[in-house]
Amino acid sequence: MAKKFPIHPAHPERNCWGCDQYCAADSLACGNGSDRTQHPMELFGDDWAQWGLDEPAGGQPPTAADPHQRQSPGG
């Protein structure tokens, strides 16, 4: 089972966030890469978990395009 992903870790710079192991930044045991993967809080700020949660304008969910309707090649 996957570990629960921390929303606001105290010291995100100390771990690699690329997999469920959360290795220390200087060990990288999983071989995920040569550098550690940053926590979203480091990249996008403290409010990163709230992004994209707004309700669409008009209160209606977005609808998918009709798959039978063809678009012209130019757009």
Image (cartoon, helix red, strand yellow):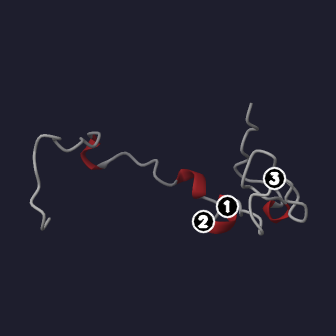
- Residue 55 x %, y %: 37, 45
Q: Nearer the viewer, residue 50 or 67?
A: 67
Q: The C terminus is located in which quarter?
A: bottom left
Q: Tag 1's secondary structure?
A: helix
From the viewer's perspective, tell me whether residue 8 is left or right of residue 62. right
Three-letter residue code for mark 3: Cys
- Residue 63 x %, y %: 24, 41
Image point (79%, 57%), residue name? 31
Three-letter residue code for mark 2: Phe
Q: Quadrant of residue 36?
A: bottom right
**Which residue bears the numbered disc 3?**
30
Q: Nearer the viewer, residue 54 or 75?
A: 75
Q: Alpha-carbon distance for marks 1 and 3? A: 22 Å
Three-letter residue code for mark 1: Met
**Which residue bears the numbered disc 2?**
44
Task: Check the image and name the residue furthest to the top.
Answer: 1
Image point (27%, 43%), residue name? 62
Q: Tag 3's secondary structure?
A: loop
Image point (10%, 45%), residue name? 69
